[in-house]
Image: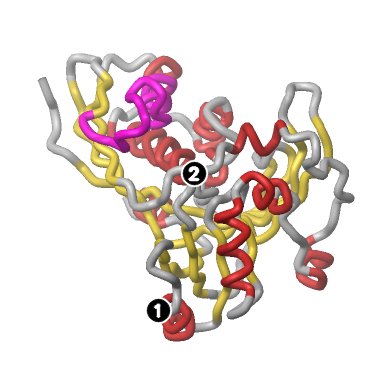
């Protein structure tokens, strides 16, 4: 039995403008430095509140079983933490490529936490929701907090940043990359020195995962080499998506028209504040 009709909530993607792996951790994760740029490419999470306590996925990516879906896991984590008797029916409309390094699954989980916290009347703080999110994935906290950010630690130590407006051409070369596999590879650089924001702005940084991903997925290397002929290009996260930055939408769209048909392309605007946070702050 349902108590409310479906409401729709945005789940934006992110880019890693650089990604340095600075060390191993005792807990099995890696220490990182990165700059998260939120973009306006978004999934949509449809949520219908249930009075019977059941949490179900009514629709979602076919390659992801419901029990493994981060939205379902997020809803159950919040339900347990808040002690609510309410449930939810979740419907995920995917626009962000799965396994693309754009944080789609993490963003879906964060949107589920934030939206259900509001719909269920749980009253948990953003800090507590970020803690719940970190147990689901290292990228979830940045989406919970809802701003572009300089990040360290596993990616959960966040400092909001104001980035100048840029437009991004994203290219998806048609493969899905396993983040876990990339970080397990022995040839991954794991000792990049820490840098400051000023040093990044001067040098541009790099993505330490790129050489490993190139070796595992020749399609990604081919796309990187192709885009580099048009503009400086980079892998986001562990890939497989790559991107280039432009000053205007017109410039980004002009280059997008040249992307070979065998690849998907997107043009997205960088944003400093998540559309979900703006909606929640507006009440």
Which residue is found at the position 49% from the left and 44% from the top?
A: 176
| Residue 235 on the magenta segment | no
Residue 110 at x, y percent in the picture = 45, 38
Q: Secondary structure at mark 1?
A: loop
Magenta range is 58-77
Q: CA distance from mark 2 to mark 1?
A: 23 Å
| Residue 81 left/right relative to 20 | left
Residue marked by disc 2: 176
Residue 152 at x, y percent in the picture = 73, 45
- Corner quadrant of residue 92: top left
Q: Closest to the observer: 19 or 195?
A: 19
Which residue is found at the position 80% from the left and 40% from the top?
A: 187
- Corner quadrant of residue 228: bottom right
What colour scheme was applied to this rendering of the protein? secondary structure
Q: Closest to the observer: 280 or 185?
A: 185
Q: Is residue 63 above or below residue 82?
A: below
The quarter of the rendered structure image containing the N terminus is top left
Residue marked by disc 1: 257
**Earlier sequence position, callout 2 versus callout 1:** 2
Which residue is found at the position 42% from the left and 50% from the top?
A: 97
| Residue 23 left/right relative to 163 | right
Q: Closest to the observer: 156 or 127?
A: 156
Which residue is found at the position 53% from the left and 56% from the top?
A: 241
- Corner quadrant of residue 188: top right
């Amino acid at each position: 039995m349902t108590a409310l009709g479906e409401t729709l909530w945005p789940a934006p993607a992110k880019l890693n403008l650089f990604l340095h792996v600075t060390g191993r951790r005792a807990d099995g994760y890696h220490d990182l430095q990165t700059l998260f740029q939120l973009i306006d490419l978004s999934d949509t999470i449809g949520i219908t509140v249930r009075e019977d306590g059941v949490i179900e996925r009514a629709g979602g990516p076919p390659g992801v079983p419901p029990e493994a879906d981060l939205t379902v896991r997020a809803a159950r984590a919040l339900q347990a933490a808040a002690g609510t008797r309410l449930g939810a029916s979740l419907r995920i409309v995917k626009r962000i490529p799965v396994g693309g390094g754009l944080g789609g699954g993490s963003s879906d989980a964060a949107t589920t936490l934030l939206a259900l916290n509001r719909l269920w009347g749980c009253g948990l703080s953003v800090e507590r929701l970020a803690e719940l999110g970190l147990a689901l994935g290292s990228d979830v906290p940045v989406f919970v907090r809802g701003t572009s950010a300089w990040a360290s630690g596993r990616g959960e130590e966040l400092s909001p940043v104001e980035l100048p407006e840029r437009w991004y051409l994203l290219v998806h070369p048609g493969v899905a990359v396993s983040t876990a596999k990339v970080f397990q590879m022995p040839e991954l650089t794991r000792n990049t020195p820490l840098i400051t924001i000023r040093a990044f702005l001067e040098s541009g940084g790099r993505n330490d995962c790129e050489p490993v991903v190139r070796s595992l997925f020749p399609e990604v290397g081919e796309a990187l080499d192709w885009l580099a002929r048009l503009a400086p290009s980079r892998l986001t996260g562990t890939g497989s998506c790559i991107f280039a930055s432009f000053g205007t939408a017109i410039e980004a769209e002009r280059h997008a028209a040249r992307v070979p048909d065998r690849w998907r392309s997107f043009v997205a605007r960088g944003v400093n504040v998540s559309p979900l946070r703006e909606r929640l702050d507006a009440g």
